Structure formats: C-alpha cells, structure tokens
Amino acid sequence: MITITPATEEQLSTIRSIAYQTWPSTFGAILSPEQIEYMLTMMYSPEALLTQAHEKNHVFLLANESVSQEALGFVSYELDYKGESATKIHKLYLLPDSQGKGVGRQLIDCVSELARRHGNDRLSLNVNRNNKAIQFYERIGFSVVKQENIDIGNGYLMEDFVMEKPLS
C-alpha cells in the first residue's frame, strides 16, 4: 500500500535524492550527461527546491510504501497556474523500481482531487517530446495541446509537449 503526504522542508533532500536517482535512466537516451547535470543542479539544489516551495507556490507530495515508509516517488504542483483555473504539474518522478506499479497514477489522482476541490478545471504539464512517459499521460487522460521550446540557459533547450487533462 502507498501513502501520499505533503513533503516537509526536511524531506526536500529525499526529493532531491529521488531526482538524482531517476534522471539518468529517464533522460539518459534523450539528453547529454552535461545537460542532465546542469538541469539537476538548476532544479534540485537545496536552494532551488526551497525557492520552489516558498516563493513559487510549488507543493510537493511524497509517495511512500506504507509499512516501510520507503520513498517511492514524488510530484510537485501549483494551483491556479499563471492566474488560470489550471493546476500545473511541475514534476513527477518515481524511482525506477516503483515505475509501472500504479504509483504515478495515484500521485496524479491525488493532485486531481486537490485541484478539483480548489476549483481548478484542468491539469497541465510539460514533458520532453522524446520521453516515454507521454504514453502514460495519454493513458490517464492527458492530450497534447501544443509544443514549446524553453531556453534554460547554458545553450540548452527543453523541447516539450504541453499536455492537459480536463477535470470534469
């Protein structure tokens, strides 16, 4: 069984650890090792995570195995993204051994329920255009609404699909 709880500030190091364990297998065939390292530092340094939580209104949820309390993965989201009636899923990563076991779906379902209760009418997320997770998102009701290229500095681009899912 899985328990999903809001991450405390002390647990941001667990989120960082999950990202560092997940990114090489998730992006190793898509991005250069240099870009992976650059992005991990940019998005998952202790300072970056604190800024996301305290200044950018990102909420982090941790999925843990109920008995052992072993961390399995996390999601971060933001309600009322850019003043719209949308909840933005900024991050969703599961440890490799936790993938394909329904943990990601449970995290998305949890965010969906929180967004609905808040009054948002859709979920939105960005995903690399070559990421195998696209099929997962499509299976659970997301569809591609546009493409975007985001310059993240240092000569790197995030080449993403923007996907949305209505919350009806």
Image (tube, helix red, strand yellow):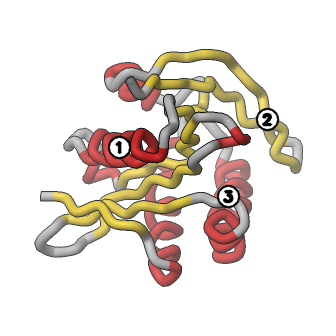
Disc 2 marks which amino acid? Ile
Image coords of residue 163 (percent x, y): 55, 24
Which residue ends up furthest to the bottom in the rendered image? 10
Residue at screen point 59% across, 34% down: 85
Image coords of residue 114 (percent x, y): 40, 48
Q: What residue is shown with label 2?
A: 150
Cβ–Cβ under 8 Å for marks 3 and 2: no
Disc 1 marks which amino acid? Glu
Residue 45 visible, this angle = no
Circle 1 Cα neighbour tier, 10 Å, few/some/many (<14 / 14–19 / ≥20): few
**Is 32 situated left or right of 115 in this image?**
right
Image coords of residue 156 (percent x, y): 81, 41
**Is 114 situated left or right of 148 in this image?**
left
Q: What residue is shown with label 3?
A: 37
SS for callout 3:
helix
Report the Cα–Cα distance between label 3 and label 1. Answer: 34 Å
Cβ–Cβ under 8 Å for marks 1 and 2: no
Residue at screen point 26% across, 53% down: 97
Cβ–Cβ under 8 Å for marks 3 and 1: no
Q: Is residue 9 above or below residue 49?
A: below
Report the Cα–Cα distance between label 3 and label 2. Answer: 17 Å
Q: Give the quadrant of the C terminus.
A: top left
Q: Is residue 159 above or below residue 2?
A: above
Q: What residue is shown with label 1?
A: 113
**Which of the two discs, 1 and 2, sits closer to the camera?**
1
Circle 2 Cα neighbour tier, 10 Å, few/some/many (<14 / 14–19 / ≥20): few
Disc 3 marks which amino acid? Glu
Report the Cα–Cα distance between label 1 and label 2. Answer: 29 Å
